[in-house]
Image (cartoon, rainbow, N blue to C red):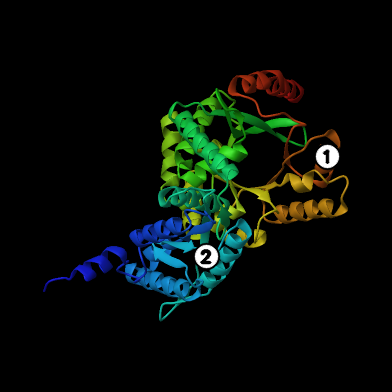
Amino acid sequence: MAVSQNELQTMAYTDPLTGLGNRNRMRDKVIQISSERASDPAPFTIGIANLDSFKPINDLFGSAAGDEILCQVAHRLKACIPDGALVTRHDGDEFAFVLPLIFERASAEKFGQMIREVLSAPYDLGDRNVRLSASFGFAIYPFAGEDCEELLKSAETALYRSKRRGRGQITVYSREIAQEMKRATQLEQALRNAIISDAIDVHFQPIVSLANNQVVGFEALARWNDPDLGFVSPGVFVPLAEERGFIDALSEALLRKAAEAALSWPRELFLSFNLSSAQLMDPGTSSSILSILGRVGFDPHRLELEITETAVMSSADTAHRIIADLRAAGVRISLDDFGTGQSSLGRLRDFIFDKIKIDRAFVSRINSDRASEHIIKAILAMCEGLELEVVAEGIEDYSEAVKLRMLGCGMGQGYHFGRPADGIATLRFLHENYYHDTSAQERVSA
């Protein structure tokens, strides 16, 4: 059966799944508005909405359920856009808008908030309901671009910033945001190159026994000093590596370097190393860690892995298996930042930990805030009952160390005992402190 010219035209401008217009339809609409306003270029806005975490839902419930959700999204969007506006579907879970009567930032943000609310209501899949959020990027003509491609690129830059900030965010393009995104992209590329060239360093901060100030181990901390960017905080580049999906490569390089350095320490000292939430969601993490230890020749019994409550909660079942596999090989597990996350007591019941690290938010106020002191007392009493070791983080002066020792805290870490230092400085620290202290103790016991 022959297809008419009109039908071919309709097919070329229509998304076959939802019946909405497609990119071609959007481009024509933008060209039409631009030409109408050529003599007096009044602003108009285009926007892009992207469904957050749509892929996992698609994977979990199947592509038919995913298609049903996309059709429901399309129906909602079509029902609530203003007269004269256009909504189209682009690739996958991305929808776009042309909004002729939205002229400035505040109106674009208000429209985004309205659409966000509309899309957040549950989606009916027959035997179950699912919820979704959406992120938005908007670009205003002519400030963000004078043709469709430029405007789309600007809207995508704004959307990209929204996705970086979390779920359900709304961003309107500006030159400042463009610069921010450009810097983030440059930082990402520099970090990738630094990982490839093995230029990320490991520094070590001592963990001591509060009973005698004797060093018992070191925590490994990532440090990056780029030739062009200078010192980049781990609080910036570690989340970036997680967000862009190469935290595994970074973590593996750091663990290898840390384990190699720790081979030079006395065998009774442990190495403490941080695991990210992304690694606790990856079933291959335990085998990867044990493989690195095997290649380096580092005893798993000397390794302690620090994890946070937030990381554990991201994917509890997978995290449980990873922790069980590592503990079976002799690796010890510390719960980091204890008291600052959610469901702390529930996690202690559900997971097997060897050690708790009390967050510095409590430690720093132990001498000035009775509530912080009582919280630390309660944590110590609970850990004694559960036979868990305790490290107090962020000890910065002598009085904090004395108070924690009096309360019965076993170990401490912080600037009072030593700042993070590179491998060579750490060996020097051990020769000046540890070997001298242990030989003196041996003479006394003899």
Q: Which amino acid, by three-letter code, is at mark 1?
A: Glu
Mark carried by residue 400: 1
In the image, what residue occupies the spot 64% across and 33% down?
217
In the image, what residue occupies the spot 51% across and 33% down?
254
Residue 238 visible, this angle: no
* Residue 268 % position (x, y): 60, 31
- Quarter of the figure with the N terminus: bottom left
- Quarter of the figure with the C terminus: top right
Q: Quadrant of residue 116?
A: bottom right
Mark carried by residue 180: none
* Residue 424 % position (x, y): 60, 19
Give the left or right position of residue 32, taking residue 387 as reference.
left
Identify the residue under disc 2: 133
Instruction: Name the residue furthest left.
Output: 1
Q: Which amino acid, by three-letter code, is at mark 2?
A: Ser
* Residue 246 % position (x, y): 45, 41
Q: Nearer the viewer, residue 275 or 346?
A: 275
Q: Nearer the viewer, residue 209 or 132?
A: 132
Q: Which of label 1 and label 2 is nearer to you? A: 2
* Residue 29 % position (x, y): 40, 61
Give the left or right position of residue 29, taking residue 385 as reference.
left
Q: Nearer the viewer, residue 16 or 403?
A: 16
Q: Earlier in the sequence, mark 1 or mark 2?
A: 2
How packed is label 1: few (under 14 Cα within 10 Å), some, or many (20 or more)? many
Q: Quadrant of residue 183?
A: top right
